Image (cartoon, rainbow, N blue to C red):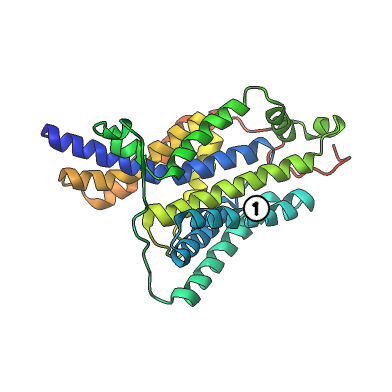
Amino acid sequence: MTPLLTEAFLSALLYGAVSAGVPLLLAGLGEQVSEKAGVLNIGLEGMMLCGAYAGFVAAWSSGSFALGFVAGAAAGLLVAAVMVLLCVRLALDQIVVGIALTLGAQGLTALLHHFQFARSYPRLPAATTWPLPWLSDLPVLGPALFDRHPVVYGAFLAVGLLILLQRRTRLDLQLRAAGERPEALDIAGVDVRLVRSLAVAVTGALAGLGGAFLANLGAGLFVPFLTNGAGFVAIVLAMLARGRPLWVLLGAMLFGASLALTTAIQVAGINIPTDIVQMLPFAAVMLVLVLLGRRASLPAALGRPYVRGSG
């Protein structure tokens, strides 16, 4: 490759990795919070899908990307409220409810899209970016990292915020106790169901925001089943990260880079069968599962509903 071609290849790869990785990062961070509190949120895919649909419709109808992201987070929060009611308050099986929410979200968003748009697929205009002074002028890194929409910066800041919260803050200790020893947290006078409810709510908002990012900034449109398994990939990332937000970031960017490899290879003019390139992201997930799956550390009470007095 010539130096110019190499720079174009790396820039396209890094830009695509961030674009594809941010939705996974937001959803993965939310799932990590939920799992730490003891709630296995299999409905993450449904939360992302509802966030994608609501975010797109709000941005398309109002012309405001900001309103679209607010609507996406609100839609994810609404789905999370259903999960709180069924899994945390009524103590139903988290896996069954999560699968039902995902299937329901898939059917509902496809039906709503059909009634509203029929067979048309309107697109959103390009969103305005916020270039950071000096940093955005850097070669390769500048356009990919420092000339992006504010939601991208917010996703990276969320990683730092969660790392700070893990520095043995009271909130982090309560989340850990809710996932490891909920009965001990109850004895200490803290409402376990409230802690878990707030954790699931945070998950829903972040997943909905990730879905809105996927529709509004990633694809620029909404199609049924847009998330295409992104929520389940985010669950895997959260499990393998073992409670470390930075690992979720690294995993999301790795998977995003695998997804972006198709575009980067086309920019570089490398002749590789498209089917092989499209298989790379999922091959990467399988490889990571094989290498790190056995070392995944999950909370002792994960997936186990808590009923006061049962422990």
Q: Nearer the viewer, residue 302 or 132?
A: 132
Q: Is residue 96 visible?
A: no
Q: Identify the residue at image location x=22%, y=44%.
A: 265
Q: Is residue 104 above or below residue 177?
A: below
Q: Is residue 126 above or below residue 259?
A: below
Q: Identify the residue at image location x=56%, y=31%.
A: 161
Q: Is residue 118 left or right of residue 274?
A: right
> What x and y, as percent, mark residue 165?
62, 28
Q: How many numbered discs, if any? A: 1
> What x and y, as percent, mark residue 254?
38, 36
- Mark 1 highlights which residue? 80
> What x and y, as percent, mark residue 167?
63, 22
Q: Residue furthest top?
A: 167
Q: Is residue 292 visible?
A: yes
Kind of residue sitting beneath label 1: Ala
Q: Residue furthest front?
A: 133
Q: Is residue 102 left or right of residue 259?
A: right
Q: Quadrant of the N terminus?
A: top left
Q: Is residue 211 left or right of residue 90?
A: left
